[in-house]
Image (tube, coloured by chain):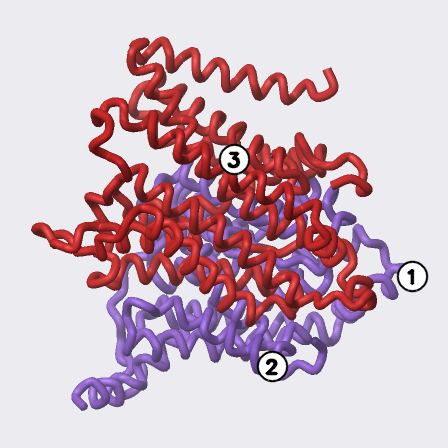
Amino acid sequence: MKRPWLAALAALIGLGLLAAAGTLNLERWGSFAIFFVIQASIYALLTLGLRVQWGSTGLFNLGVSSLFALGAYTSALLTKSPIASAGELAGAGLPFGVGLLGGMLVASVAAVALGAFTLRLRGDYLAMVTLGAGEIIQLILMNEEPLTHGPEGLRAIPQPWHSLLSPRDYNFLYGVIVLTALVLGYLLLKRLVRSPWGRALRAVRDDEEAAEALGKHVFRFKLQAFVVGSALMGLAGGLYAHFTTFISPADFEPLQTFIVWMMLIVGGSTSNRGAAGGAYLIWGLWVGTSVLSGLFPSIWAVKFAYMRVIAIGLTLQWILIKYPQGVWGERRRSRD
Amino acid sequence: MSLWNDFVGQLPQLLAYGLVTASVLGLGAVGWSFLYRIFNFANFAHGDLMTLGAYWGLLFNVGWRLPWSLAFPLAIVATIGSALFIDRVFYRPLRRRGSAVLLISSAGMALVLRNTLRLFWGQSVHSYDLGFHQAILVLPGVRLTPEALIGMAFALVVTLGLFGLLQYTRMGKALRAAADDLDLARVCGMSLTWITRWTWVLGAGLAAVGGIVLGVEQHLLYPLMGWNLLLPIFAAAVLGGLDHPSGALLGALVIGVGEELFGFFFPNYRPALALVVLIGLLLWRPAGLLGGRS
C-alpha cells in the first residue's frame, strides 16, 4: 500500500456506514445514501470553487461560507412564492434555473467587490478581508429581517418538478440534478485548467513577478479566477437551499469554510479529482463519525461534537505536514 | 436629534469603554504584529491563544482555587508553554513551506484550541473568582468597574514594560533586528531557535495577558471571546503599519474607541467597523497610517 493511512480512513468510514446500516433499517438505507450523495456533491462544488481560487491561482479565500450563503439566500428569494404566508417572506416566484443563476450572479458580484480591494495586495489581506466579510454576511442574515427573516431563516423554498414524484422518492430526482451540476462543473473546470487561461493562472500562482514580466495581466487573471470560483460556490448555495427547502444563518457559519478548506487540502488542492474526492472523503468521515456518536450515551453527544472538530483539525495538521500535495494532488509540478 | 443628544451625553462613557476595549486589543495586536514581522506569519489562532490564556487563568484561579496573584502569572507561563509546544509540533515543520501553509495551519489550530476548551469547560460562560464590584464614578459622566480600571492599568504596565524591553535590553535589540530582517540577523550569528523561542514568549505572553485582562474587565469568559477579537486585531495591526509595536498600539486605540462610537449608532453591526477600516486602509494607505513600508 502506498498510502496506508488512506486505507485506515476508508476503513473508518466503512465502519461508520456499517454502524449506520445497523441502526437504520434497510429501507431507509437507500434514502440515506442519496442524502449523502446530494450533500457531498454540494460540498464538492464548493471545494471545486476553492480549487480554482487557491489551488490554481493561490488566492486565499476564508469567506467560502458567505458566498455559499449569498447563493442560497438569493436563489431562495428569487424562487419563493410571491404570496406571503403567515410569518413568511414573499419571494419573486421565478423558476428554479433563474434562481440558481441569480445566486451565481450575486456571489460573483460580491467576489468582484471583495477582490477589487484586495487582489493587488499580498495574500494575507485577502484572507483577512474575506474572513471579515464572512462575519458581516452572518450579521446581515441575522439582522436584516425584511430581507432575510433574521435568525428564523427562510422556509418553504420551492423544489423543481416537485409534483413529478412522491415526496418520499423526490430526492432521487434531486440527486440527479445535483450530480448533473457537479459533473458539468467538473468538466468545465477540467477544460479551463488545461486551457491557456488555466496555464496563466498557474504561472500567477507560482511566480507572480515572472508572469507579470511575461506580459500577463496578473490582477485581471486573479479577479477572473476569484469570480469563477465564487460563482461555483453561489451555485452550491442555490442547490443547497432547494434541497433542504429551509435555510437559516446557522447553515452558513464560518465552520463551513473550514470544512471546505479541509476537503481541498486533504484531496489535493491542485487537482479537480482531489477537490471532488476530498469532499466525498471528508463528508464521509463527518457523517460516519456522527453516526458513531449515536452509539454513545447522549451525555457524550455534545462532547463528541467538539472532539470531532478537534480530530478534523489535527488531521489537517497531519496532512499538511506529511502529504503536502494531498491524496490526489500533483506529484510533480510539471503536470496539473 | 435626540439620538445625537444622547450620543453627546454618553460620549465620555463611550470613550472610557473604548479605552477598556483598546487595552485588550493593544495587547493582542502588538503580539500579533510581532509574530507577523518575524515569521511572516499571519496567525489566525492568535485570538484563540488569548482565550487559552484566559482559560488557563480560570483553571488556576477557579479550578485550583489559587489567588489571582499566583493564578494569573502561572496562566501566562502555561500559555507560553502551550504556544511553544504548538509551534514545535505543528508550525515548525511547515516553516519552510511559506506563509500561506502556516496560515491554513493556524486557522485549523484556532478550531482545535477553541473546541478543546469547550470540551473541558463547556459552551457556557464562566468568570474569575475575584468578587463582584459595582461600577464607580471615575470622572463626571464616566462609570467603570474597579476590575476595568485594574485591567487597563495592568495592560498599560505590561505594554510599557515590553517597550522598555525592546528598546533597552540586548534581547530586545536582537529581536528588533530579527524583525527587520530575519535572514540578516541569522547571518550575523543569531540562532533561529533562540529567535523563535523569544518571539513566542513575547507574542504568547502578551496574548495571555490580553485574554486575562479581557476576562477580568468583562467579568466573563466564553469560548468565542478571543476569536471575536481577531478581526479588530488585524485591523489594528494593519492600521499601525506593522512597522513598530507602537503602531499596533495606536491602531488598537483607534479601533477600540471607534467600535464603541460606531456601536452606539449601529448596535447590531459593531463588529463591522473593523472590516470597514481594514478595507478603507487597504484602498487608501496599504502601508498603514504610520508606516512607510508596504
Q: Label 2 sits on what residue type?
A: Arg
Chain identity for the colour purple used in the image: B
The answer for which chain carries disc 1 is B
Q: Position of residue B81 (x, y in %)?
A: 62, 46
Q: Residue at x 54, y 58 (%)?
A: A227
Vertical comparison of A191 with A163: above or below: below
Q: Position of residue A255 (x, y in %)?
A: 44, 45
Left or right of A231 in this view: B194:
right
Q: Which residue is mark 1?
A: B187
Check if mark 3 and mark 1 are on a common chain: no
Q: Which residue is mark 3?
A: A183
Mark 3–mark 1 distance (CA, rounded to whole Å)? 53 Å
Q: Residue at x 82, y 68 (%)?
A: A213
Foreground residue, A23 or B9? A23
| Labelled pair 2, 3 in contact (Cβ < 8 Å) | no
Mark 1–mark 2 distance (CA, rounded to whole Å)? 33 Å
Check if mark 1 and mark 2 are on a common chain: yes
Q: Position of residue A298 (x, y in %)?
A: 29, 23
